[in-house]
Image (cartoon, rainbow, N blue to C red):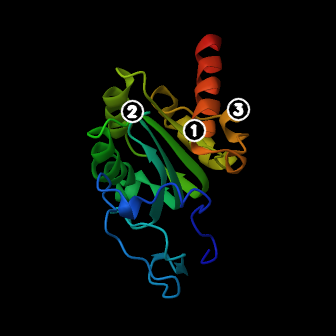
């Protein structure tokens, strides 16, 4: 796991450590000294801590004029034991919502497991963004992670599924990715 670094191609256009509106503003990273762990496995030092014991993130891009943010996650998403969604909502999403972000893309292809609890924070997050035609979506979930999220009925508040799992986001610009997700969300709304 130590060699899985956050996606870096957009780093010349956006860096959360230089963005005063993020909770990661001013962070300094050591490229060679590994201190962060998920259980007994060291992870790349570029990942950001946000309060969880088993889940780390990187804000890959935020555009306050367009109102969107793109996150990448790694680790075990554990709401049951560690209430990870509370930390993600309170310490990251809420800060960005205050700055006008209402569309959230969460790249979850490195989320190895998901353990559900209640859906209160998901519902609150959805309520915070829906009036601005906002949404929260998850890309590229592992099948077992998606199944657990379905079992927890998170689909009421967060979009995920087959079409969103097939997005080749690395081949896109941030605005291209948002447009692709917007298009997929429109298709989903028409089907329901």
Residue at numbered disc 2: 102
Q: In this rendering, would 148 be left or right of 164?
A: left
Q: In the visual, does 176 lie left or right of 87?
A: right
Q: Residue furthest front?
A: 12
Disc 1 to disc 3, how far (Cα)?
18 Å
Please name the residue that numbered disc 1 is placed on.
175
Instruction: Judge from the rendering whether residue 152 lies leftward or rightward of residue 161; answer left or right.
Output: left
Please give the label number shown on residue 163: 3
| Residue density around tag 3, few if under 14, some if 14–19, many if 20 or more, within 10 Å | some
Residue 45 in the image: x percent, y percent? 49, 77
Count residues near mark 2 (Cα–Cα under 10 Å), then give few for <14, some for 14-19, many for 20+: many
Residue 37: x %, y % from top left: 48, 77
Q: CA distance from mark 2 to mark 3?
A: 21 Å
- Residue in front for this viewpoint, 84 or 169: 169
Please state, as top left, top right, bottom left or bottom right, where the N terminus lies in the image.
bottom right
Circle 1 or circle 3, nearest the eye: 1
Secondary structure at badge 1 equals helix
Label 2: element kind? loop
Choose top left, top right, bottom left or bottom right for residue 190: top right
Apparent side of residue 149 relative to residue 51 in the rendered image (left or right): right
Residue 95 placed where, x, y %? 28, 47
Which residue sits at x=41%, y=59%? 16
Figure quadrant of residue 118: top left
């Amino acid at each position: 796991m130590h060699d899985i670094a956050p996606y870096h191609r957009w780093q010349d256009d956006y860096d959360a450590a230089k963005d005063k509106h993020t909770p990661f503003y001013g962070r300094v990273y050591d490229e060679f000294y590994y201190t962060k762990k998920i259980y007994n496995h060291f992870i790349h030092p570029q990942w950001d801590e946000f309060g969880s014991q088993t889940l780390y993130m990187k804000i890959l891009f935020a555009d306050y004029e367009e109102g969107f943010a793109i996150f990448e996650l790694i680790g075990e998403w554990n709401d049951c034991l560690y209430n990870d969604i509370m930390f993600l909502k309170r310490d990251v999403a809420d800060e960005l919502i205050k700055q006008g972000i209402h569309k959230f893309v969460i790249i979850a292809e490195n989320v190895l497991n998901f353990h559900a609890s209640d859906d209160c924070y998901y519902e609150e997050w959805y309520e915070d963004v829906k009036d601005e035609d906002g949404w929260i979506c998850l890309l590229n979930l592992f099948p077992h992670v998606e199944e657990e999220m379905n079992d927890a009925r998170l689909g009421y508040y967060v979009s995920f599924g087959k079409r969103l799992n097939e997005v080749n986001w690395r081949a896109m610009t941030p605005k291209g990715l948002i447009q692709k997700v917007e298009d997929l969300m429109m298709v989903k709304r028409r089907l329901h």
